[in-house]
Image: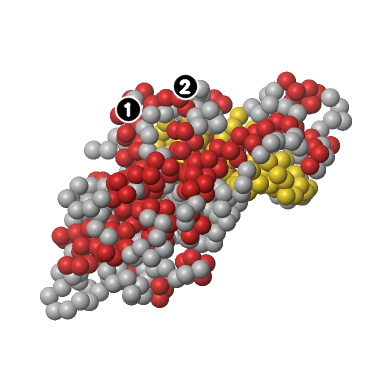
């Protein structure tokens, strides 16, 4: 606790509740314009300051009356486009954190990247500057408002927010003491290549996006065959794969169609589309461009149909801006149209990937968070926690593992300050058949304050799921092994071990 905070605690009748919630109580900063400052009663009494940084970076800063002396910034999702703060989902404000979110410098609806057309400033803001500038200005506003230094600075985010988290650790290592990166969208060029090649296989005719060539029934059959072969490998038949890398299922095992295409068999085109998902994108010479997806979650709500296949006939994606068959279609084509080629008429179906790396080089240099050297972040005591659902159809679990392994290959000692937790059966950021409920803000705070990295994290099954109980999440590559007796949904009956 800062010296001034200690004095405030000791002086009778003096508290943060007596601070005025108005513009005059906030410091003047050169690049900040306030649009509103108001007192808000819920979920706890706080002062909400909304404003604009620079040209068009919008933010909302929440300043609780009962401040705990700490700051957390929450990340956004997708192309962002509205002020978002994922830390609120972890109860940051109610816990006493001063907290901020940003729209990353543009306004848009749904999965729409048209805001980036011929606008480098917006792309750079979205890529990395908006989060950094918001963090720096928010910290100055917090210190000025409370008249005290901040004890700890944190960032938590998932998906795009997870990518923002890694960008901060790599580009701006002094901004935060502890960072949580969930399912990080860290390679936008890789995601674009991955998405386009999957869409080319799922929707080879760009004039017909009504339904993918892989039906929901075929996805269920595929997942059923995978689970039938591998679900019980961990000693528990619970409808999830504890470690998909231990499952040797092959697309070649799928039944072939001999008398016409039905939902009971798979054509060569359907097998090819499935392989595109598992194998990952390649260039015209067959050289890998990015990662594929691990097995699992093929037929889950929030799985393939939502992100990779589906079709406009059953999709409500994109908030009505323009019907899209699935989320990856919107993201990957949007990236290519508005950030790579700046051509709204660009056609995904005919693209050959013969010069992709060069064409996407400027995008990658601005948006990607692929640098494995985290020494500057670690040198000032920074801690980075990464988590990822194994059954995530938005961000590949193999891609997240790939980045983590690159960090450790760059410096094997990094595992003291950087840890990855894989979540069996969990979809994008949360949900699915596996245990996904964890307050990662509490976890990173305890790690930074104590200096002791968690050996395991206890996760709960989400409300409304088919299960209740807990299971440990282990530091990758360890997996949670059931001891063979007792409640299969009680974390105390598991131990973290290295996989066979």
Which label is found at residue 72? none
Q: Quadrant of the N terminus?
A: top right
Identify whether 179 is placed above or below 259.
above
The answer to whether one can see residue 24 in this image is yes
Residue 155: x %, y % from top left: 54, 38
Query: Left or right: 275 with respect to 334?
Result: left
Residue drawn at x 79%, y 26% as measured from the top left = 8
Identify whether 169 is placed above or below 459.
above
Looking at the picture, the colour scheme in use is secondary structure
Identify whether 454 is placed above or below 264.
above
Residue drawn at x 32%, y 49% as measured from the top left = 359
Residue drawn at x 51%, y 22% as measured from the top left = 380
Compare residues 19 and 206 and report the one nearer the observer: 206
Q: Which secondary structure, mark 2? A: helix
Using the rendered view, name the quadrant where residue 14 is placed. Answer: top right
Q: Quadrant of the C terminus?
A: top left
The answer to whether one can see residue 458 in this image is no
Query: Left or right: 413 with respect to 79?
Result: left
How many neighbours does mark 1 have within 10 angstroms: few (below 14), some (14-19), or many (20 or more)?
some
Q: Which residue is mark 2?
A: 379
Q: Which residue is mark 1?
A: 410
Residue 432: x %, y % from top left: 42, 56
How many neighbours does mark 2 have within 10 angstroms: few (below 14), some (14-19), or many (20 or more)?
few
Using the rendered view, name the quadrant where residue 216 is placed. Answer: bottom left
Mark 1 and mark 2: Cα distance apart in space: 15 Å
Query: Left or right: 397 with respect to 76?
Result: left
Residue drawn at x 66%, y 46% as measured from the top left = 52
């Amino acid at each position: 606790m800062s010296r001034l905070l200690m004095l405030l605690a000791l002086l009778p009748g003096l508290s943060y509740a007596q601070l005025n919630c108005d513009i005059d109580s906030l410091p003047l900063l050169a690049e900040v314009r306030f649009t509103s400052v108001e007192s808000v009663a819920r979920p706890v009494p706080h002062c909400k300051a909304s404003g604009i940084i620079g040209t068009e970076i919008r933010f909302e800063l929440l300043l609780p009356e009962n401040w705990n002396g700490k700051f957390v910034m929450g990340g956004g999702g997708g192309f962002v486009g509205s002020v978002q703060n994922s830390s609120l989902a972890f109860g940051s404000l109610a816990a006493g954190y001063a907290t901020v979110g940003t729209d990353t410098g543009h306004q848009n609806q749904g999965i729409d990247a048209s805001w980036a057309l011929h606008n480098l400033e917006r792309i750079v803001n979205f890529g990395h500057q908006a989060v950094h500038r918001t963090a720096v200005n928010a910290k100055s506003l917090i210190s000025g408002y409370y008249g005290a230094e901040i004890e700890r600075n944190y960032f938590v985010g998932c998906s795009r927010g997870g990518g923002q988290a890694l960008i901060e650790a790599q580009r701006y290592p002094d901004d935060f003491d502890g960072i949580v990166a969930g399912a990080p969208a860290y390679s936008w060029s890789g995601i674009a290549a991955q998405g386009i090649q999957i869409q080319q296989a799922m929707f080879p005719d760009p004039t017909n996006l009504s339904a993918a060539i892989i039906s929901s029934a075929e996805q269920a059959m595929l997942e059923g065959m995978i689970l039938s072969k591998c679900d019980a490998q961990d000693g528990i038949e619970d409808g999830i794969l504890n470690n998909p890398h231990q499952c040797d299922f092959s697309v070649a095992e799928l039944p072939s169609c001999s008398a016409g295409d039905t939902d009971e068999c798979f054509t060569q085109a359907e097998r090819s589309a499935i392989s595109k998902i598992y194998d990952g994108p390649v260039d015209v010479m067959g050289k890998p461009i990015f990662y594929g997806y691990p097995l699992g979650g093929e037929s889950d709500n929030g799985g393939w149909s939502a992100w990779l296949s589906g079709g406009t006939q059953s999709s409500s994606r994109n908030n009505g801006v323009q019907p899209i068959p699935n989320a990856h279609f919107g993201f990957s084509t949007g990236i290519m149209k508005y950030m790579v080629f700046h051509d709204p008429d660009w056609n995904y179906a005919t693209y050959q990937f013969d010069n992709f790396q060069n064409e996407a080089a400027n995008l990658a240099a601005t948006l990607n968070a692929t640098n494995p050297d985290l020494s500057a972040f670690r040198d000032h005591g920074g801690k980075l926690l990464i988590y990822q659902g194994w059954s995530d159809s938005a961000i590949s679990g193999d891609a997240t593992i790939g980045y983590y392994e690159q960090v450790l290959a760059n410096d094997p000692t990094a595992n003291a300050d950087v840890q990855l937790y894989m979540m069996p059966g969990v979809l994008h950021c949360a949900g699915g058949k596996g245990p996904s409920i964890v307050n990662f803000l509490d976890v990173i705070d305890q790690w930074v304050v104590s200096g002791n990295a968690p050996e395991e994290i206890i996760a709960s099954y989400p409300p409304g799921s088919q299960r209740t109980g807990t299971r440990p999440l282990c530091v990758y590559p360890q997996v949670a092994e059931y001891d063979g007796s007792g409640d299969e949904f009680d974390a105390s009956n598991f131990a973290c071990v290295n996989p066979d």
